[in-house]
């Protein structure tokens, strides 16, 4: 490592210094994970990404041991990253009235998502809890996902003015999906055409006090290619009712369709039961009291 790089690291916060060291070394998070694994250290790429973006920091004994090994992999002076660690954060999850459920990004494969979320200043926990969600996705004659219409009924668990919506396109084109909202105003959004993530920051016309409900209607029109194989939604907190509907073009309907569940998007979907596509090309499934995780449908063409 050059003297200039070392001096720059010493003048920044831990996660900034870690990011600089990673960029200087020129290794992907997956390669870093593999280097650590070769040294007998198990750290997920998700954890490395959280450290790099400042969403979390090494605190436990095993995390500090991993950071010591990581300094060796990154070829930075021993102790240079550890010296930048801030005091340990309060243990455990935030109080239920401030941040319910699971950390939002824990449910998604990371890729570029933490960068998008950090740019929009998305908090680790949402302060809204779903009451009911109704998704209706439409497909064209090529089996390509063209539009998604969603109604979300949510209840504030703390004073809330903003909401962050995460969408994923299975076969994204470079052009950003078109999104319109009713019940909230679009403040900003970030699109990554490589991974297919779209993150929207929404603002309500007044601050919601704890316990107040709100309904947000959303229409998303996709620019995509390739036959879609699923429609799922990730819930960071239990939801009373989730309805997933799909309408296929009459000229191309799936052979089989299943309701599915997974703990998060990184795990394979588990088939729950087979669904019937009716003569109009429509199929739906209803989940009640769905737990934290990923729920929806998949199909076979």
Image (cartoon, rainbow, N blue to C red):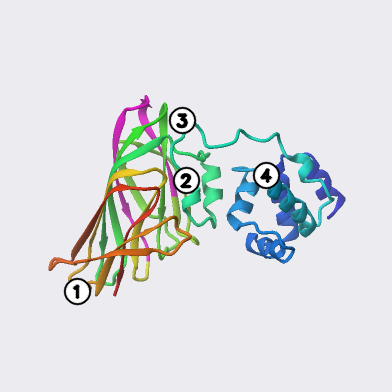
Query: What secondary structure is marked by label 2?
Result: helix
Look at mark 3 in the image and give the residue it sits on: 98
Task: Tell me the CA gap for discs 4 and 3.
Answer: 24 Å
Look at mark 4 in the image and give the residue it sits on: 60
Q: Residue at x 36, y 48 (%)?
A: 291
Question: Which image quadrant: the N terminus?
Answer: bottom right
Q: Nearer the viewer, residue 206 or 49?
A: 49
Main SS of residues in magenta: strand
Q: Does label 4 or label 3 sit earlier along the sequence?
A: 4
Task: Tell me the CA gap for discs 1 and 3.
Answer: 49 Å
Residue 58, how many percent across, how many down? 67, 45
256 left or right of 230 in image: left
Residue 55, how many percent across, how many down? 59, 43
Look at mark 1 in the image and give the residue it sits on: 251
Query: What secondary structure is marked by label 4?
Result: loop
Residue 177, how many percent across, how many down? 38, 55
Q: Nearer the viewer, residue 272 or 20?
A: 272
Q: Residues within 10 Å of mark 4 (few under 14, many from 20)?
A: few
Image quadrant assignment for residue 85:
top right
Q: Residue at x 48, y 31 (%)?
A: 95
Q: Residues within 10 Å of mark 1 (few under 14, many from 20)?
A: few
**Which stretch is magenta?**
199-224
Mark 1 touches mark 4? (CB < 8 Å): no
In this rendering, the answer to whether 210 lies above or below 152 is: above
Question: Which image quadrant: the C terminus?
Answer: bottom left
227 left or right of 123 in image: left
């Amino acid at each position: 490592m050059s003297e200039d790089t070392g001096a720059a690291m010493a003048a920044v916060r831990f996660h900034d210094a870690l990011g600089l060291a990673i960029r200087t070394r020129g290794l992907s998070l997956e390669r870093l994970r593999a280097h650590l694994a070769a040294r007998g250290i198990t750290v997920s790429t998700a954890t490395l990404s959280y450290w790099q973006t400042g969403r979390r920091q090494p605190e436990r004994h095993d995390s500090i041991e991993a950071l010591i090994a990581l300094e060796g992999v990154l070829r930075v002076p021993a102790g240079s990253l550890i010296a930048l660690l801030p005091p340990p954060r309060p243990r455990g999850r935030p109080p239920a009235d401030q941040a319910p459920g699971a950390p939002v990004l824990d449910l998604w494969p990371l890729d570029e998502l933490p960068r998008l979320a950090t740019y929009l200043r998305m908090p680790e926990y949402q302060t809204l809890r779903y009451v009911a969600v109704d998704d209706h996705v439409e497909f064209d004659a090529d089996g390509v996902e063209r539009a998604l219409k969603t109604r979300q009924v949510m209840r504030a668990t703390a004073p809330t003015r903003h909401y962050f919506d995460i969408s994923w396109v299975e076969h994204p084109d470079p052009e950003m999906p078109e999104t319109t909202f009713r019940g909230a105003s679009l403040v900003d959004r970030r699109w990554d055409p490589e991974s297919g993530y779209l993150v929207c920051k929404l603002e309500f016309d007044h601050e919601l006090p704890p316990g107040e409900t709100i309904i947000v209607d959303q229409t998303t029109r996709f620019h995509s290619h390739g036959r879609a194989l699923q429609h799922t939604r990730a819930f960071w907190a239990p939801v009373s009712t989730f309805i997933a509907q799909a309408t296929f073009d009459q000229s191309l309907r799936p052979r089989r369709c299943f309701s599915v569940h997974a703990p998060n998007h990184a795990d394979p979907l588990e088939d729950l039961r087979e669904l019937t596509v009716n003569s109009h090309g429509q199929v739906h499934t209803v989940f009640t009291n769905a737990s934290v995780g990923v729920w929806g449908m998949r199909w076979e063409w």
